[in-house]
Every structure is written in C-alpha cells, then in structure tokens.
Amino acid sequence: MQVTTSSRHTTLKIILAFVCVYVFWGSSFVAIRYSVQFVHPAFVAGIRYLVAGSLLLCFLLARRASLRIGRRDILRVTTLGLLMFTCNTLLLSYGGRQLPAGLTALFISTIPLFIALLEAAMPSRGSTTVLSWIGIITGFVGIALLLQHSVQEGLLPKAATPAALGLLVAAFAWAVGSIMLNHTTFNSPPLVCTCWQMLIGGGVDLAIGLACGGYQASQWNMETWLALLFLAIFGTLAGYTSYTFLLRKVSISSVATYAYINPLVAVLLGWLLLNEPLAPRQWFGLVIVLVSVAIVVSLSPAAPHVAQKRMETSET
C-alpha cells in the first residue's frame, strides 16, 4: 500500500513538473515579448537571472550550504553562464523584440537539431541514422522557408531577418552549453553551480545593458516589473527546477518534448494575450519544423544524461 501511494505521489510530481516546463517555459516567450517593448533586452535578461540567482542564493544560505566552488569549476561555471545565460538569453531578448512570441519560440526549438548536429560531429558518438539526418535537414529548411515567406509577404519586417538569425545563434549557444554540461564533471554541488551561473550571466547582461544606455531607454512600470518577476520566478526557477527533476525521473527523449510543446503554448498565449495570429503559410512552416524536431528527439539515445547522473549523486 505504501509503495502504491509513493508511486502515485511520484507520478503526480512528474505530471506537475511537465506542466511547469510546458506552461512556464512556453509562456516565458510571451513575457519576454511584452517586457522588451518597454525595457532594454539586456536588462530583461539581466534582471531575470540576477533575481533568480539571488533567490536561489538565499535558499542555499537558508540550508547552510557552502557557496564556494573549486578552482577547476570557476572557469566551467563562467563559460556555461556566458553561453547559456548571456549569449542565449541576450539574443533571445533581442529577437523577441522583433518577432512574435510563437515564432521566437519556434526558432529556439531548433536546440535539439543543433545538439544532434554537434553530437554527430563528435568522434565518440556513434553514426547518425539516415532518418535523424532527414529530420535535421528538414528542420533547418523549414526554418529558412518560414522566414523567407514571412518577410516576402510582409508578415515580418526586413529588420526581423537579423533577429531571426540571432535566435538561431542563441539556440546554438544553448546547444553548445548543453553538450559541455553533458561532458563536464563538477566537483561542486549542482545547485551551487547553477546559482553562480545565473549570477555571472545576469551580471554580464546587466553590465551590457548599462553600457548601451538601456536604463535611460527603458520605461519602468508595474506591468513590466510583474513580467520580469514572472520570468525570474516561474520561467527560470520553477521551470528549471522542474526540468532537472524530470531528468532524474524520466527519459531524456520524454523531457525533450518541451522543444515542440513550448512553441505551441507560445503561439496560443501570444494569440490570446498579445493578438499575434499566424498566417496559413506560417502554420505550415511551424508544422514542418516541429515534426522535424520530434523525429530528431524521438531518435535520440535514451541513455541517462551525464549531468543527470551527477545530480543523482551530488545533490545539495
């Protein structure tokens, strides 16, 4: 009876975690889209991670956890923070100013395609299947066609092209960071490393915003602060915590379904909250890209993630 009850509780936690990742990460694109209309994109990224990192710092201090990290971990944490919380999020925020929330999420959903492409180039990785290559190529072709038709038909301004390319660079940066995380062993506890990654990445973002005169160019109001707090608390802390929990409980391929669920959530919420409908051809491109991502994710190895193993053995 106790085993059954425990199993039910675990199942409920897994369902709740999936809901958090799907809804909070999907809705984050809408919050970013709203915020960057009033606040400089670098400030949106910086405040998001500085608040989230500070809250995580308080949590660790309340648990009397040591915040020190080893010398070997300093460079790794800094590199990952700059890749995933500066390069990725800065370009995501800039792109979110030009593109609708749903399209922004769609470009970011190419992360699994970049991961598959980078892993295929690694000597230690086995041969990539033909179906995986078809998924990778079709996904990027779908992105190119979607952007081309959107600009040609006047659905997006020409200024959106550099922003869209920046989003692909953002997805690539996150993919590189994910692979680095996959092949890196930390001596410090995962939550401590994550805390410092957020604080370092957020601090650099804020410094860039100040250097660009972002504070004077921003319009601060209650709605903007609420959107930023949502990004920090729900989009970052709750979403990321749920994500790491799922990595310990279910297969990687199941967790990676967020890559094609988040754009659908972003499209729906963008339509409901920001009045951002998609044209028929954009829906067609959306389907091509998401099907391609689904193929690549479904064919990804089901072996436990290295980072997952570390979290299971060295939790704070």
Image: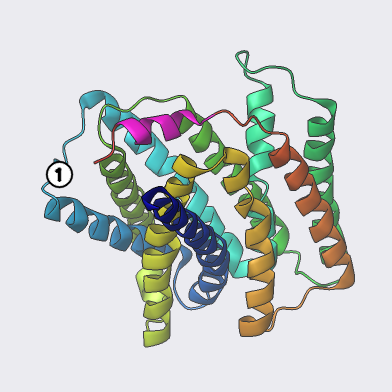
**Residue pictured at 46% horizontal, 24% vertical:** 183
Q: Position of residue 27 (x, y in %)?
A: 55, 69
Q: Position of residue 100 (x, y in %)?
A: 67, 70
Answer left or right for 263 relative to 313: right
Nearer to the camera, 207 or 229: 229
**Residue pictured at 34% horizontal, 64% vertical:** 47
Can residue 209 be seen by looking at this rendering? no
Answer left or right for 141 relative to 188: right
For the record, the magenta segment spans 304-313
Can residue 106 be seen by looking at this rendering? yes
User: Is residue 311 highlighted in magenta?
Assistant: yes
Q: Amino acid at mark 1?
A: Ala
Colour convention of the picture:
rainbow
Answer left or right for 89 relative to 56: right
Image quadrant assignment for residue 163: bottom right
User: Residue reaching furthest front?
Assistant: 1
Circle 1 SS class: loop
Is residue 109 shown above or below 187? Answer: below
Prevalent SS, magenta region: helix
Q: Position of residue 77 (x, y in %)?
A: 33, 36
**Residue pictured at 66% horizontal, 37% vertical:** 114
Mark 1 lies on residue: 65
The C terminus lies in quadrant:
top left
User: Is residue 209 highlighted in magenta?
Assistant: no
Q: Position of residue 61 (x, y in %)?
A: 13, 52
User: Residue reaching furthest left?
Assistant: 64
Q: Residues within 10 Å of mark 1 (few under 14, many from 20)?
A: some
Is residue 3 shown above or below 159? Answer: above
